[in-house]
Image (cartoon, helix red, strand yellow):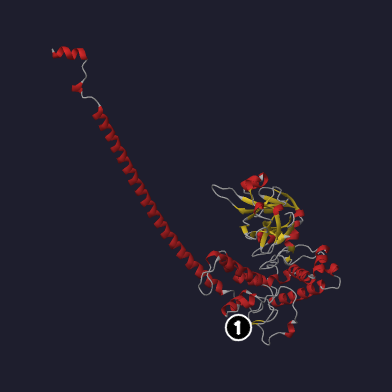
Amino acid sequence: MRKGKNVIGKDVLSLADGIRIHSVKDLIIGEENDSIVALLVDEGGLFSGSTVVPIEAVRSFGKDAVVIDDASAVVAASSLPRVHAIIDRKESLLGKKVFTNEGQELGKIGDMYFTETDGKIVGLEVSGGTIGDLAKGTSYLPIEDVQRSGADVVFVRPTIADKLESQQGGLQGTLSDAKDKAGQLSSDAKDKAGEATDKAKSSVASKDPEQSLVGRKSGMDVTDENGGIVLAKGQRITAEHVSRAKETGNLSVLTQAATMGQVAEVGDQTGAAMGQLADSAGSMWDRFTAKLSEVTDSTGQRVDQQQTKAQLDKIADAIGRPVSKVMLDREDSVILDLGDIITHQSVQRAHDNGMLDSLLSNVYKGDVTFERDEMKAQVAGDSTVEKATGGATMVEELEQKVQTAEEEKRAQDEQKKQESEAARQQREQEREERAKERDEEAMKRQQEAEEAKAEGSPDASKVAVPVGQEASQTR
């Protein structure tokens, strides 16, 4: 199984001669929205059409590239009427809104999962809408739960709403009960989170994996050695998943996925504490992340959008998770103790002390091999959930840099606009001058032609006289 967006951008390699032929620009989804029928490798242009690789011509989807037999697998889209018609319609499954047949909006489709052998779509990734996806939470929707798909929306059964809401995750966890639990002490929330984690670990670590894992939701994407997705985040674990994991020796990975899934399901126990943290820094964080393309890093150097997006994704994924080692600042004061929940303030502290990369590299995402009490520091951290009092001020600094960059960009745009207008006026003046020269040249040629015509005509005083009359006049 593959995730659609993970395929886009990968090189297309020829097995016959070992050369890179193209890269995948997009996925062409069939008319019924139930399968991938081709890979778009060239969008074409004014004088050339699009070229595609039919899904049946793909030899394999690798971790880093798509392999085809040879260059003959790349064909013109116009040679495949069904594919060409889909491209011409310019419809996309991605971005379509998901509704129940009772009219409740659940979100919109952000990605899809498909099988590598035949391109069949087996599930959809849904985010936003009433799912309460404030940051990056997503839900897995099995394709069999889709009742019908139209040009603008996808309809699912009403019962799917509860299923998707139970998978809710992301930066702020399950915030649906945050207001009701606003008075809950953050320390109590943290204790409950620890109990939930311990409960999840013990329940999925039984001696009978089939009984403990089957039916649970995965808390992460589980991939094979080639990067193929064998279990999607939010998908229910089946006996087949367990059997395959046992055969490949990856039962511990499946257990980790189930553990994370169960912790996410009981995440509402820590929703109040996480909600309070989100309120303190969420609004400026959202404004900041909306300007990814203009962000500069702490050294003032330019960071491209892809790098910034990757870093922000890491930060968003870390917020609300425990840290897997003691984090110290430059004065050896404890920022976070082992197992403390990562907060916006702790991210800021780590950033200020040059420890952000270390913090993001030591985020607890599953089972650990040590006991927390064995490695606790003697002094409690001062950026924990209980003690956090502020947000990430580096966001404000970055926002200021964004604002400065925007002002510079507006000034540059205005200058370019003025230069463009001056160039346009110059071109217009030159066109008028050339037109005037052409008109003058045409008038000159016309005048010369008329003069030449006049010189070639007989003079009125030299009108020809018949021969007989001329002889008589002579006599």
The answer to whether residue 103 is seen in the rendering is no
In the rendered image, residue 278, in percent from the top left (x then y), is placed at: 63, 70
- Which quadrant of the figure has residue 446? top left
> Which one is in front, 223 or 186?
223
In the rendered image, residue 451, in percent from the top left (x then y), is placed at: 25, 32
- Lateral position of residue 401 relative to residue 276, left or right: left
In the rendered image, residue 239, in percent from the top left (x then y), is placed at: 83, 63
Disc 1 secondary structure class: loop
Name the quadrant of the C terminus. top left
Above-or-below relation of 436 to 388: above
- Which quadrant of the figure has residue 349? bottom right
User: Residue at coordinates 63% horizontally, 78% vertically from top-left?
Assistant: 358
User: Residue at coordinates 28% horizontally, 38% vertically from top-left?
Assistant: 444
In the rendered image, residue 114, in percent from the top left (x then y), is placed at: 72, 57
Q: Disc 1 marks which residue?
A: 329
- Which quadrant of the figure has residue 343? bottom right
Above-or-below relation of 138 to 452: below
Q: How crowded is mark 1: few (under 14 residues within 10 Å), some or many (20 or more)?
A: some
The answer to whether residue 435 is seen in the rendering is yes
What's the residue type where badge 1 is placed?
Asp
Name the quadrant of the N terminus. bottom right
